[in-house]
Amino acid sequence: MRIAVTGGAGYIGSHTVKLLNEKGFNVLVIDNLFNGHRKAVPDDVTFIKCDINDTENLKKIFNEFKPEAVIHFAAFIEVGESTKNPLTFYLNNVSGTLSLLSVMEQTAVNKIIFSSTAAVYGNPKTVPIPEIEPIKPINPYGQTKATVENVLNDLSQFGNLRYVSLRYFNAAGADPSGLIGESHHPETHLIPLVLKTAKGERENISIFGTDYPTPDGTCIRDYIHVNDLARAHLLALEYLLSDGESEVFNCGYGKGYSVREIIETVKKITGRNFKVIEEERRQGDPAVLVADPSKLKKTLNWNPEFDELDIIIKTAWNWELNRRF
Ligand code: UDP
């Protein structure tokens, strides 16, 4: 079974590619290496450097490889950055996806798994958040993902595309093998930044906002281990390949941790102390994002294996100490 994976050299992409490869899928990774890492792709997986906005080249690749389905990770992901350069986000996340979808249509590929995000909910009214919660993003990143979800919905309703949109909460942790893990340049995510501080690579960690309406005043997020997230992609793929209808699923554990709790857990796991600074809020951050993952569990029979903050931090710490890229 041939599967094309855009953004397969990135963080969540590479963990999914490793899993698909181990399960015997014939995987082709397409990545422009803007944020991805060549070393994150296993040696026995075919890799092609290509930007998804390069429609002509992408079409050639699809005509040759003839994928049965696409898993589409390639996108810009930083909320803060999206508030500074919204157009860049639209060009990559929306135009890039339209380019990919047009190639899929021209080459008769009609199954796609899309990397969506909890950011499409903005400040949700119901927490834990069910998939039926209104889509009201409060930052450009979330808007780009919501826009693509609308496109997918139209192509599915009025055409023959079938899709699964996975709304990720906060991906974290690393593969226990130590071969792959999170590596963004510059890094903006909380857990790797706290670990870099514990490691001594940074002088301190900043808490962005301590006046949120949460028990300790800091933002709460649902951190999901990247391998459990990878497994959700495998299950979604099997679902589409066995004629499943278009669907949207939240991917999280249904349990949230505050920024302060993350910092305390890192101190506990690493046995290191470090300086914590309280700063102003970061633009575009909702106070609480926690998933209701019951639909994913019920429909795709997803059972998380790494559902513990300690395991997430331990695997991420192991990666941080022995990074390959
Ligand atoms: N955060 C923080 N300090 C940092 C980085 C992040 O306090 O140095 C906070 C951020 O404001 C958010 C939470 O940690 O409330 C998770 O942020 P991250 O960027 O990891 O993921 P996001 O939820 O934005 O996808």
Image (tube, rainbow, N blue to C red):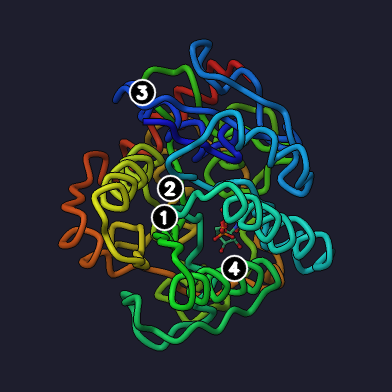
Which one is closest to the eye, mark 1 or mark 4?
4
- Residue 280: which quarter of the image? bottom right
Amino acid type at circle 2 is Glu
Name the quadrant of the N terminus.
top left
Tell me the crowding category of disc 1: few under 14, some 14 to 19, or many 20 or more residues within 10 angstroms, Cα based: some
**Residue at (55% x, 84% y) in the render:** 136
Q: Are marks 3 and 4 in contact (CB under 8 Å)?
A: no
Tell me the crowding category of disc 4: few under 14, some 14 to 19, or many 20 or more residues within 10 angstroms, Cα based: many
Number of marks in the rendered image: 4
Which one is closest to the eye, mark 3 or mark 1?
3
Label 4: which residue?
A: 148
Label 3: which residue?
A: 176
Q: If you read the primary sequence from the N terminus, does the residue marked by circle 3 or circle 4 appear first?
A: 4
- What distance separates the C-alpha of mark 3 from that of mark 4? 33 Å
- What distance separates the C-alpha of mark 3 from that of mark 1? 23 Å
Label 2: which residue?
A: 264
